[in-house]
Structures are given as structure tokens and as C-alpha cells.
Image (spheres, rainbow, N blue to C red):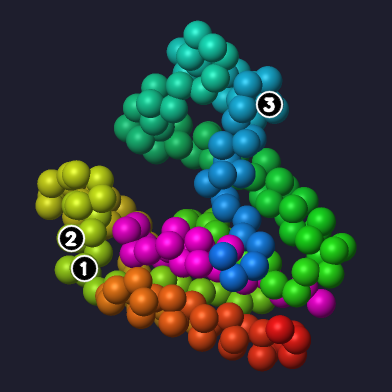
Amino acid sequence: MTKIVGLTGGIATGKTTVSTILRQAGIPVIDADQVARQVQTPDSVGLTRIVKVFGPKVLLPTGELNRQALAKIVFNDKEALKKLNEILQPLIYDAIFAQVNTLKKQGIPLVVLDVPLLFEQHYDEDCDYVVVVYTDPQTQLKRLMARDHCSKEEAQTRIAAQMPLSEKEARADFKINNNGDQVALQKQVASLINQLKAKQNVVK
């Protein structure tokens, strides 16, 4: 019986690093951001629908999506962002669970869904367990500023735009504290894997 594990966290908390460690341990990880890019490739249903709603100005001369042009539209207009989500989310969801079903047929015991907006987009309802990666607010702010080379004010605005980490933590089955170094993080992920396997009596 395949168990679906939802993986999420706040911006700059280290979710991507945890995802990488899980992959290295041989656990399949389906990356929602990667799937989102796949459903917007040239000549795809997703891109065709985006162009129909937002016009050819969101296309590059190559026929690919002009992400910067689209971002300027949707991040300054809540209604436009809503329209974009209405186009993309059903396509992303279907593509993710097509992969999940393929892995289920192969008898894979654990599948991780790496979804930044796991709770906001209700993917948690399809998961057997949810894992949240978190840091303390000061560490999160410092890492975001260093990673994206942005000001303290810009970083605070981006963090404030997300669901509070405390709320995500409260709704999680497992929590990974990423305030420490890489070694500490790897130990926690190894412990997580063991706990997940123990829950379903998966033989290593």
C-alpha cells in the first residue's frame, strides 16, 4: 500500500534541501514546481489557455512562456492571479496524481509530494502524512535575504504573504527543524524516513 507524504514549509526554510536528501535515500519525490513548468511548455494545453486569457504578450518569440511578463500581470492583480490558478491548478493536480498512480502500480511504498502551497491548495487532503520544514523567524529572514539578495523589508513582505509557519507546523504530522547545519538536517530526515517506514512496516 503506497503512502503519500506531503512535504511543505515556508520560503527559505530548506524544503528543497530536504527533498534532495529524500531523493538521495531512494524515495520518489514529485516536485509540484517542476510539474507546473511541464504543463506550460510550448503547445501544451496549459500554455494555450494562458495565452487565450492573457494574450500573446505573455509569449517569448520562441513560443515559450514569458514568465516575467506573466508575473508582472498576476502579482499586481488578484483577479488575474485567480484566473491563472484556475487554469493551472487542475492541470498540475492531474499531472501529479498521474505520476502517483504510476508509482502505486509499481508497488512503491512511499511517495513524497513536494508542494510549496500544500495546505493552501488542499493537497494535504490527499496525503497520508504531512511533513513541514521550519526555522525560527530570524533564521528564515536571514537565509531569504542571502539567497535572493533582497532587502530586509522585501524579505519580510514575501514571508508575510505566506501562510504563517506556526499554522503549518500545527497541521503537520512530522516537523523538521532546520535551524542547524546540514549534518543535523540529514539526521532528522533519516529519522523521518525510519518513522514513516515503521508506520507501514516497510522492510528496508
Q: Position of residue 21 (x, y in %)?
A: 50, 67
- Determine the residue located farthest toward the top in the rendered image: 61
Residue holding disc 1: 139
Q: Position of residue 104 (x, y in %)?
A: 81, 65
| Mark toward the viewer: 3 or 2 | 2
Q: Secondary structure at mark 1?
A: helix
Q: Is residue 167 visible?
A: no
Residue 44 bears which disc, if any?
3
Question: Is 15 inside the magenta-drawn segment?
Answer: yes
Q: CB under 8 Å between callouts 1 and 2? A: yes
For the residues labelled 1 and 3, the Cα–Cα distance comes to 40 Å
Q: Position of residue 80 (x, y in %)?
A: 45, 31
Which one is earlier in the sequence, the residue at label 1 or at label 3?
Answer: 3
Q: Quadrant of residue 142?
A: bottom left
Q: Secondary structure at mark 2?
A: helix
Q: Quadrant of residue 150?
A: top left
What is the magenta range?
A: 1-23
Residue holding disc 2: 142
Q: Secondary structure at mark 3?
A: loop
